[in-house]
Amino acid sequence: MKSMSELDDLALVLRPDQILTGAAVARVYDSDAYSVDRSKPTAVVLPETNEEVAAVVKVCVKNQIPITPRGAGTGLSGGAMPALGGVVVSLKRMNKILEVDSVNRRMKAQAGCVNLDLTKAVSHLGLHFAPDPSSQSVSTLGGNIAENSGGPHTLKYGVTAPHILGVTFVDAEGKIYEIGGTAPNCPWPDFTMLVVGSEGTLGIVTEAWIKLTPLPAAVKTALAAFPSVRAASEAVSGVIGAGILPAALEMMDRNILVALEQAFGLKTPPGTEALLLVECDGEESAVEREMTLVAEVCHENHAIEFTLAKDEAERKKLWTARKKGVGAMGRLAPSIVTHDGVIPRSKLPEMLDYVYAVAAEFEIGVANLFHAGDGNLHPCFYFDDRDPKQVEAVVSAGEKIIRRCIELGGSVTGEHGIGVEKTELLLLQFSEDDLKLQALVPLIFGANEVINPCKVIPNQKGCIEHKKRWRGVAW
């Protein structure tokens, strides 16, 4: 970690109120929402313009000070953890909507804008920003771009990438670029899609042109209660097999329901072991038809109860179970790690049985709250991170589950990113040649060891301390 004497040049490019230091600051910014790994920064800076971001990068490159870009810190794989200390570049003050072009359904906004605020700004125009991570009330556009975030409506509308037209980007040498543009399907090489999902390892996104999507004419939301996780899983396959593409198809298991009951008084029918939240949107007649089919599929798979929201207020109430689930788990234990493996939908029953077996093997609690429609699992391990044995158990259990996802034809991540959590697990999914090719991408952007080190690409110099956890992987 660099000393403050080595950071004096920051005071030449920023005001005093834009530079935060001290023990409390270091503690607050030593991780994102993935709490297994922690590393304290020397300073946190709060730039307000593209030029200030560029100036900070130049200072850090000159002094070889590690830089970690940060949005709201809601990431779940350690992407915003300052792995080698140094400077955290927080974009929270770059939170302005710069331009709205409703005719062409696009908006330009700074990276620190909160996801949900983007939709609120244009909902009166009949438009919205479709990517909706569960943290959307606090997560920022820049963080969504860095992680290529998904959300409950990914099944129909996709992750963040297809909704980004272009970005303003500060590279690892402090140069400012405009990448992409305001028009879709431009003929030049699509460097924008290399930036989206790069987790701040190529540079720092400061602004973006985003696509706006028309609000659907009709929306219907239902909550179905099932006597077992397997029955709910079979219903998921049944809904997709019936040719229905819901806007959202989410599953919650019993332990999530226990937490929700303790936190918010959520009541479920006796015998409920799992809930499915299903949302269909589009034209009125199509939505009516789809939801009728969804109800039939759920009843065929032994649903105990099928509740269809009658109005917007009831819709929001049904969504409480999904949106507040992870937060409610604080009632079960002081610490939570949420994993992010992907599997084919047809493997859901088998994989969930495996998740419960692994949790029992390592004697830790687990709850499942996830995007069932696209096979994006979120096993939530709850534990006490003050106990080293529990931390070790959580890490080992997580590795075992991700390994199984890959064996079943899935992936190490669907939306949370690689960060520090899964760098070595990429060696299980990709060959050595694959990873060598991926390692060439940062060279296109002139990336260096200063910009968000120890993230995504395995075997980076100086990052051994954040890789010793993966003892079961050869590296």
Image (tube, rainbow, N blue to C red):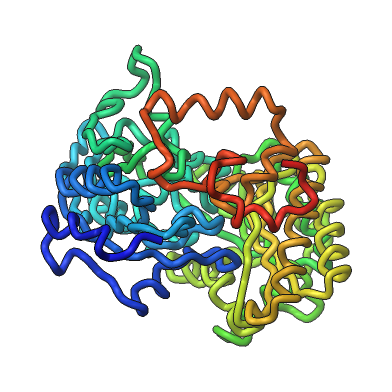
Q: Is residue 352 left or right of residue 28?
A: right
- Residue at position x 83%, y 75% from top? 363
Q: Nearer the viewer, residue 32 or 188?
A: 32
Q: Nearer the viewer, residue 153 or 285?
A: 153
Residue 206 location (% of width, % of height):
26, 44
For the C terminus, give its image quadrant. top right
Q: Is residue 394 left or right of residue 454?
A: right
Residue 389: in sight, yes or no?
Answer: yes
Residue 469 location (% of width, % of height):
70, 58
Residue 145: in sight, yes or no?
Answer: no
Residue 352 location (% of width, % of height):
81, 57
- Residue at position x 43%, y 47% from top? 452
Q: Nearer the viewer, residue 109 or 241?
A: 109
Residue 267: image quadrant is bottom right
Residue 250: image quadrant is bottom right
- Total marks shown come to 0
180 in relation to 225, above or below: above
Q: Nearer the viewer, residue 115 or 454?
A: 454
For the N terminus, give its image quadrant. bottom left
- Residue at position x 50%, y 72% from top? 317
Q: Is residue 16 left or right of residue 207?
A: left
Residue 100 location (% of width, % of height):
18, 42
Query: Given the current orientation, which residue lies at the most extreme top position?
Result: 187
